[in-house]
Image (spheres, grey):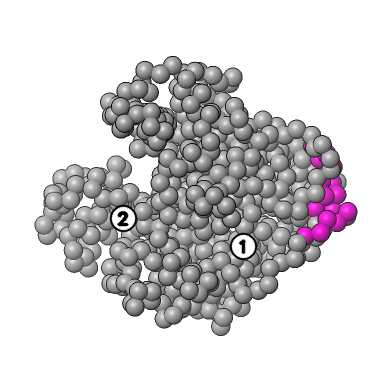
């Protein structure tokens, strides 16, 4: 994701109108503990409350010991028993991150940094009186998105999904950014286990959360033998890491990846200096420590800090790292928008996660956690990151947004979103289908019936943008799961809600059976498994279900598949580009460092070639 794009709808639309987070409704009353919800788990008794949907909710349950002090960069430990019965009435602390739209908390210090290192909490929603005998309910374990550097479980209210379709919904926090993924030789030297040395602590938090579900979810009416992990964006990527991780084996039984993809950093990028023979990321652990030395006045510049750090003993480096406050460390990273920072996350350390890309990780069914899997993207993914970017939008009178060039806008969004679909769905689906057969399902979310804000047509500017499907899956459009409470066209709410009902039905049926089929109600359009057209000897073999309202074709199966050769053929034949730079940038964004990259083709591209536009000069998504 191109984090520098994320100016997103805040200054212009949120401040004057306030539609992004609010709905105009009065705040919900504070929950009241209800003895009927009391359950006994391994840590002790927990009491929740009756939620607005009539189900039971328990919020802010610790699933691990707080990762503080010398546990900061260590694998999570099981939680201690409660000292007193827990009143689980409010979500636990969010993890340390920059304040933003996904973490809009009070910031008393006004330093832009919110959250706590004591943040390993989860929320549970279940139908009232969920069975605790042999007929326990499927569990749906939600992993939030946010680039693995921002977000928390709190906004995702699973009550409607749980009560309507007899599932238990768990939403979890996990450590973020440099607290969730941080790898350095000095930390390995003091590690008690290979997990402690791995650096993939956010991934291990999710594994610990699943272990907590295995050990405790029966008390809430959930079946520990039927757990679906599902997540969106970085949460979807984290679902794939759980499929790849030997540490998660046996802890889940189905997987749903919403707008995700397989993106692994290498240990070298996570750790090396920028000037090493194999350079690291600009915020690798060594570069972060060097910046800390400069920030403290212990080095005059980055070069001096690197030289000093190379001469330090591991014990001194550990003391420096553990002695730094969370806010001091976080301030070493730049807020790239929406609170997200650029930092290495999710690397193939050889212990928690194997090395390699999807072709290596998912080609052999013996090498990963094989489960039925749903993969999907939204048709206009990247428009979320374009819809208020000054590169694409003019501001009349300083605050009224209008697209500068609607045709160029749509073209760029289409190619960016198709590339996302290739990486997040079709390439993965083909690999997984070849490994595990007909237990792979794909979708595309096409709903684009937003309203207008001050004459700004959101149905075009945002369309079926990144994250919009979340509200449909959770059945909530009030600024909680969707975070977009005010974008909807009032005249189209019945159609929106009908599509949401269908999507919830499919998601729940998949959680119950591993096959979305005709949904829980048995009346939906059959969702067929992804099919390999070559193996099926049929160009029109079904692959993807499309989610839309009847006005735009309704819910339907489609044979469409995005391939790299197909993308390249489309781009090379596209005569609509009027600027050479745009054509070159599109080529780079689609094919950079991949098997379809052709340097000679790039240099000769279009009318003037791309020799004047070195690929490294274009920002990365």
Q: Residues within 10 Å of mark 2 (few under 14, many from 20)?
A: few
**Dividing the picture into quarters, in which one does residue 67 lie?**
top right
Residue at position x 38%, y 28% from top? Answer: 298
Secondary structure under tag 1 reads loop
Secondary structure under tag 2 reads helix
Viewer-proximal residue among 471 and 423: 471
The reply to whether residue 414 is in sight is no
The tag earlier along the polypeptide, 1 or 2, is: 1
Q: Residue 539, relative to residue 243: is it above or below?
A: below
Side of 513 relative to 246 (left or right) = right
Q: Position of residue 541 (x, y in %)?
A: 45, 58
Residue at position x 15%, y 58% from top? Answer: 606
Q: Residue 342, relative to residue 580: is it above or below?
A: above
**Residue 49 got which mark?**
none
As drawn, the residue found furthest toward the left would be 608
Residue stretch in magenta: 31-48
Viewer-proximal residue among 18 and 270: 18
Q: Position of residue 443 (x, y in %)?
A: 51, 59
**Residue holding disc 2:** 566
Side of 429 relative to 310 (left or right) = right
Q: Position of residue 24 (x, y in %)?
A: 62, 75
Residue at position x 19%, y 47% from top? Answer: 614
The answer to if 504 sits in the magenta stretch is no
As drawn, the residue found furthest toward the right would be 35
The reply to whether residue 492 is in sight is yes
Q: Position of residue 208 (x, y in %)?
A: 65, 36
Residue at position x 58%, y 47% from top? Answer: 115
**Residue holding disc 1:** 480
């Amino acid at each position: 994701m191109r984090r520098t794009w994320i100016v997103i709808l805040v200054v212009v639309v949120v401040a004057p109108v306030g539609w992004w987070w609010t709905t105009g409704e009065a705040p919900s009353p504070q929950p009241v503990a209800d003895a009927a919800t009391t359950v006994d788990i391994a840590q002790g008794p927990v009491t929740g409350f009756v939620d607005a949907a009539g189900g039971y909710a328990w919020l802010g349950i610790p699933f691990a010991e707080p990762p503080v002090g010398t546990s900061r960069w260590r694998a999570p430990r099981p939680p201690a028993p409660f000292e007193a019965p827990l009143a689980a009435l409010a979500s636990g602390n969010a993890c340390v991150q920059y304040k933003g739209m996904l973490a809009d908390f009070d910031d008393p210090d006004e330093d832009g940094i919110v959250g706590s290192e004591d943040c390993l909490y989860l929320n549970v929603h279940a139908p009232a009186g969920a069975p605790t005998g042999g007929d326990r309910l499927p569990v749906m374990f939600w992993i939030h998105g946010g680039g693995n550097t921002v977000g928390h479980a709190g906004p995702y209210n699973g009550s409607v999904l749980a009560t309507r379709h007899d599932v238990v919904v768990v939403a979890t926090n996990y450590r973020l950014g440099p607290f969730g993924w941080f790898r350095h030789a000095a930390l390995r030297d003091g590690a008690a286990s290979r997990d402690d040395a791995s650096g993939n602590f956010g991934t291990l938090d999710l594994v610990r959360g699943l272990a907590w579900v295995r050990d405790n979810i029966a008390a809430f009416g959930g079946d520990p033998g039927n757990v679906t992990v599902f997540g969106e964006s970085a949460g979807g990527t984290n679902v794939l890491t759980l499929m790849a991780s030997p540490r998660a084996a046996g802890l889940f039984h189905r997987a749903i990846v919403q707008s995700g993809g397989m993106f692994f950093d290498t240990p070298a990028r996570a750790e090396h200096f920028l000037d090493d023979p194999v350079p690291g990321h600009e915020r690798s652990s060594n570069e972060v420590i060097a910046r800390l030395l400069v920030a403290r006045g212990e080095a005059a510049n980055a070069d001096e800090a690197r030289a000093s750090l190379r001469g330090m003993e591991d014990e001194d480096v550990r003391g420096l790292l553990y002695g730094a406050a969370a806010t001091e460390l976080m301030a070493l990273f730049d807020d790239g928008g929406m609170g997200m920072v650029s930092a290495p996350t999710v690397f193939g350390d050889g212990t928690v996660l194997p090395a390699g890309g999807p072709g290596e990780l998912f080609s052999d069914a013996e090498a990963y956690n094989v489960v039925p899997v749903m993969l999907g993207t939204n048709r206009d993914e990247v428009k979320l990151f374009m819809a208020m970017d000054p590169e694409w939008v003019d501001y009349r009178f300083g605050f009224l947004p209008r697209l500068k060039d609607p045709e160029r806008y749509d073209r760029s969004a289409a190619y960016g979103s198709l590339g996302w679909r290739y990486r997040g769905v079709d390439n993965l689906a083909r690999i997984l289908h070849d490994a595990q057969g007909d237990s792979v399902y794909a979708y595309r979310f096409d709903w684009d019936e937003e309203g207008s804000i001050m004459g700004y047509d959101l149905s075009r500017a945002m369309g079926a943008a990144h994250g919009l499907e979340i509200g449909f899956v959770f059945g909530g459009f009030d600024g909680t799961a969707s975070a977009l409470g005010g974008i909807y066209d009032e005249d189209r709410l019945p159609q929106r809600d009908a599509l949401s009902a269908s999507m919830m039905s499919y998601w729940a049926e998949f959680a119950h059976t591993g096959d979305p089929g005709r949904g829980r109600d048995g009346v939906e359009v059959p969702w067929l498994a992804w099919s390999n057209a070559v193996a099926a000897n049929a160009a029109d073999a079904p692959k993807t279900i499309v989610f839309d309202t009847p006005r735009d074709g309704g819910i339907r199966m489609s044979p469409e598949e995005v391939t790299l050769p197909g993308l390249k053929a489309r781009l090379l034949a596209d005569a609509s580009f009027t600027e050479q730079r745009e054509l070159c940038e599109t080529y780079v964004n689609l094919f950079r460092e991949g098997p379809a990259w052709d340097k000679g083709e790039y240099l000769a591209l279009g009318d003037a070639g791309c020799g004047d536009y070195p690929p490294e000069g274009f920002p990365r998504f």
